[in-house]
Amino acid sequence: MIEQYTNWWETLTLLQKIYWSLAVPFTLFFLLQMLMTLIGGGDMGDDLSTDAEIDADTGIPFQFLTLKNLVAFFSIFSWTGIACLDSGMSDGWSLVASSVAGLAMMLIMASIFYFLSKADESGNLKMSNAKGKLGEVYLTIASKRNSIGQIQIKVQGSLRTLEAITDDETDIKTGKVVKVSDVIDNNLLLVTANFS
């Protein structure tokens, strides 16, 4: 079995090896993302569950470069490249075709998430419901309100990524568990890592 795999691998061109090296891990990661999305996103520590930014006043911006979109790009890019090379297309044209297919997939996914998030826009989210809840820092929150970061928190039954600041003396790094102590101007969470 291993010898057959080795013989097969040695017959591939450099570009085919690159495509296959991208196709397998990114496809597995893509399938894992889909599974996690279907079963509800998993635990608080799951970075794959949301890429959309929720803002109670202005809505969701169109986000093209997200983890989900990049995984989708490399999955489609690699499989399209493999198919193009197998059909006899030249290396140059297969790179063009696979890049276009990957970018199209990113655009489609970004559009889907944008329009889905528009359907769940601000009227439904009551920021005050986040008060007293625990969340996980998604983007580092600078100490003493020096800059806005983001946390992932379960509010009203769904995991959301919301903007947050802190009065803590030190920065709160990504992955740290925080508690929402207040809501400022109904769109910004005040959090602390110092709770018991």
Image (cartoon, helix red, strand yellow):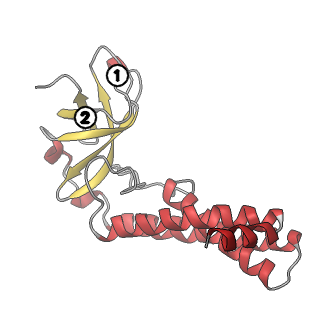
* Residue 85 seen in this snapshot: yes
Which amino acid type is marked by label 1?
Answer: Arg
Residue 96 position (above or below residue 178) = below
Where's residue 74, x and y in %? 62, 63
Kindly identify the residue that appears in the image at 12 percent across and 38 percent down.
132
**Residue under pointer 2:** 177
Where's residue 147, x and y in %? 41, 26
**Residue under pointer 1:** 145
Q: Residue furthest bottom?
A: 87
* Residue 56 seen in this snapshot: no
Where's residue 24, x and y in %? 58, 66
> Would you call the spot at circle 1 few (<14 residues within 10 Å), some (14-19), or many (20 or more)?
some
Left or right of 15: which side holds 122? left
Which amino acid type is marked by label 2?
Answer: Val
Q: Are marks 2 and 1 in contact (CB under 8 Å)?
A: no
Q: What is the number of the mark on residue 100? A: none
Left or right of 160: which side holds 85? right
Where's residue 1, x and y in %? 61, 73
